[in-house]
């Protein structure tokens, strides 16, 4: 006849095998772990500013232009103001594009967050 202690040993081994296999199966079979994440592209107004020129053609420029190049000579007050205004306009455009990008990804993050239980 088998003793009670000898019957517990196979039961413990079987229990450990079942627990280990179920834990491994859960992580491998979780649909969210294997699901591809397809993010939509950034809106075009974030990357490019498109306007019609005087001929009616659409001209696109990057939203964050390079800084204004100041000539390597002494410049007067009018030129200083002109360059400053151009530079500030570029910075404002870039800031607006950055804010649009931030709102785009913030909306995406809230849409992808887990539903409330």
Image (cartoon, rainbow, N blue to C red):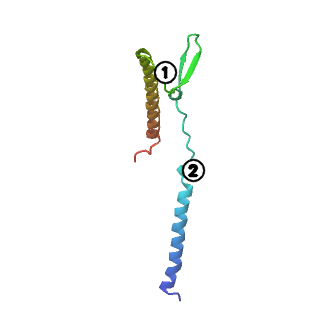
Q: In this view, which residue lies farthest toward the bottom?
A: 1
Number of numbered markers: 2
Q: Does dot 2 land on a helix, a strand or a loop?
A: helix
Q: Residue furthest top?
A: 55
Residue 88, by quadrant, is top left
Q: Which mark is residue 46?
A: none
Residue beneath the point at 55% across and 43% down: 37
Q: Residues within 10 Å of mark 2 (few under 14, many from 20)?
A: few
- Residue bearing the label numbered 1: 73
- Tell me which residue sits at (40%, 16%) in the image: 77
**Callout 1: SS:** loop
- Please identify the quarter of the rendering in which residue 58 is found: top right
Image spot of residue 44 (x, y percent): 54, 27
Taking the image as shown, residue 22 lies to the left or right of residue 102, namely right
Instruction: List the residue tagged with mark 2.
Output: 34
Q: Position of residue 66 (x, y in %)?
A: 51, 27
Q: Nearer the viewer, residue 64 or 113?
A: 64
Vertical placement of residue 111 versus 117, above or below: above
Q: Does label 1 or label 2 sit earlier along the sequence?
A: 2
Residue 29 spot, x, y in % from top left: 56, 55
Q: Foreground residue, 66 or 37? A: 66
Q: Is residue 43 left or right of residue 84?
A: right
Task: Point out the frontmost of discs 1 and 2.
Answer: 1
Q: Nearer the viewer, residue 70 or 26?
A: 70
Q: Is residue 51 above or below residue 10?
A: above
Give the Cα distance between marks 1 and 2.
61 Å
Neighbour tally class for label 1: few under 14, some 14-19, many 20 plus, Cα within 10 Å? few
Q: Check if mark 1's residue and mark 2's residue have beta carbons within 8 Å.
A: no
| Residue 17 image point, x, y percent | 54, 70
């Amino acid at each position: 006849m088998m003793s009670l202690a000898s019957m517990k040993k196979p039961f413990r081994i079987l229990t450990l095998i079942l627990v280990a296999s179920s834990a491994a199966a859960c992580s491998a079979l979780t649909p969210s772990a294997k699901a591809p994440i397809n993010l939509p592209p950034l809106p075009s107004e974030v990357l490019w500013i498109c306007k019609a020129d005087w001929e009616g053609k659409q001209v696109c420029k990057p939203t964050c232009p390079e800084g204004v190049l100041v000539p390597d000579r002494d410049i007067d007050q009018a030129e200083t103001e002109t360059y400053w205004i151009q530079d500030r306009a570029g910075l404002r455009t870039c800031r607006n594009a950055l804010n649009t990008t931030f709102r785009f990804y913030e909306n995406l993050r809230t849409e992808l967050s887990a539903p409330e239980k």
